[in-house]
Amino acid sequence: MSRIGKQLLAIPPKTEVHISGDEIRVKGPLAELTQNFRPDDISIVVQDNIVTLTPKRDTKTALSLWGTYASLIKSMITGVNQQFEKRLVVEGVGYRVEVSGKELILSVGFSHQVRLPIPDGLTVVAEKNEITISGSNKEQVGEFSAVVRSKKKPEPYKGKGIRYSDEVVRRKQGKRAVT
């Protein structure tokens, strides 16, 4: 039994949840999100501003999807009411970040600048050595921030690179002179 799947999901005011076939649509003051589901495994019911999920079968895939779908719907409801946000910190001498139009430009020690197109639905702000990525879709925010971080991961000796603001980089001591 899924602990997350058993929970009833309350729909806040000014938020609408519609289910049609294999698609669920959540509309709120900030955005409208849609997601496809497998209706043959999980039953999704919206009644009295509460979303209830129940597995239709007692198979392993249905039980594993039960909690996953509940978590996805919960993040969709949260995302249309308040934006998700990830902060990245850029550390290193000469490392710069800027946003121009729909493109994020990273100067992180390579011979060239790294240009990343910003996906639709995301807002990217670069201030000094900090990048703030925000949007209504939790999956999209997390994926784009992971792509940005992967361009120059933090290294353990000097801590240079791009890291999450709450990430702790374990530092190594490095070589020592023999005495």
Image (tube, helix red, strand yellow):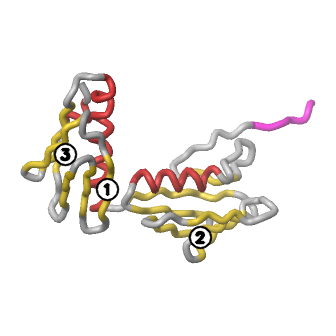
Please provide the residue range marked out in magenta. Answer: 173-179
Residue 136 or 27: which is nearer the viewer?
Answer: 27
Residue 79 or 94: which is nearer the viewer?
Answer: 79
Element carrying mark 1: strand
Which residue does the image show at 31% across and 56% down from the upper left?
Answer: 34
Element carrying mark 2: strand
Lower sequence index among marks 2 and 3: 3
- The residue pinned by badge 1 equals 34
Lower sequence index among marks 3 and 1: 3
- The residue pinned by badge 2 equals 103
- The residue pinned by badge 3 equals 9
User: Which residue is at the far right?
Assistant: 179
Residue 92 locus on image (x, y percent): 72, 58
In-image side of 61 versus 95 (left or right): left
Amino acid tagged 2: Glu
Residue 63 locus on image (x, y percent): 28, 27
Element carrying mark 3: strand
